[in-house]
Amino acid sequence: IKVGIMDGAGETGSAMVSLLALSLSMNTESENADTKTKTTEINGIRTLTEDTKRDESVSSSIKYLYKDRYSISLDGNGYTLSELESFMKELNTSPLK
């Protein structure tokens, strides 16, 4: 599982966090042959999820905002969305100020 945290301070960070905030503000759901993408809530947190199943392989991702400042992304190559959600629930983000 790869965890990415981007601070929304500064010009570039602010633009990236604003883009994610805009994506999260919409109710979206799309599906193609292998991938399902949608906005949903996990543990009361608005998220953008992606779940890919291709032949024998699976991967998933979750993106969300923390304290309206940090963009947090979780990418799980070989992990289902359900497994990644469990990891998200255990992730300690409280040190972020």
Image (cartoon, rainbow, N blue to C red):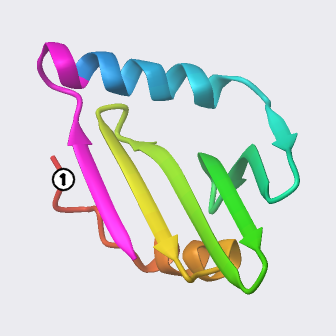
Residue 68 lies, in percent from the top left, at 37, 32
Whether residue 47 is in magenta: the answer is no
Residue 8 lies, in percent from the top left, at 23, 28
| Residue for badge 1 | 96
Residue 91 lies, in percent from the top left, at 37, 73
Whether residue 12 is in magenta: the answer is yes
For numbered disc 1, what is the local secondary structure?
loop
Structural crowding at the residue carrying mark 1, measured as other residues with C-alpha within 10 Å and reported as few (<14), some (14–19) or many (≥20): few
The residue lying at 79 percent from left, 53 percent from top is 36
- Boundaries of the magenta span: 1-13
26 horizontally vs 15: left or right: right
- Give the residue at the far front of this rendering: 55
Above or below 88: residue 36? above
Above or below 16: residue 93? below
- Give the residue at the far left of this rendering: 10
The residue lying at 33 percent from left, 24 percent from top is 16
Kind of residue sitting beneath label 1:
Leu
Displayed quadrant of residue 83: bottom right
Displayed quadrant of residue 19: top left
Above or below 33: residue 84? below
Viewer-proximal residue among 37 and 89 = 37
Q: Quadrant of the N terminus?
A: bottom left
The residue lying at 70 percent from left, 62 percent from top is 51
75 horizontally vs 59: left or right: left
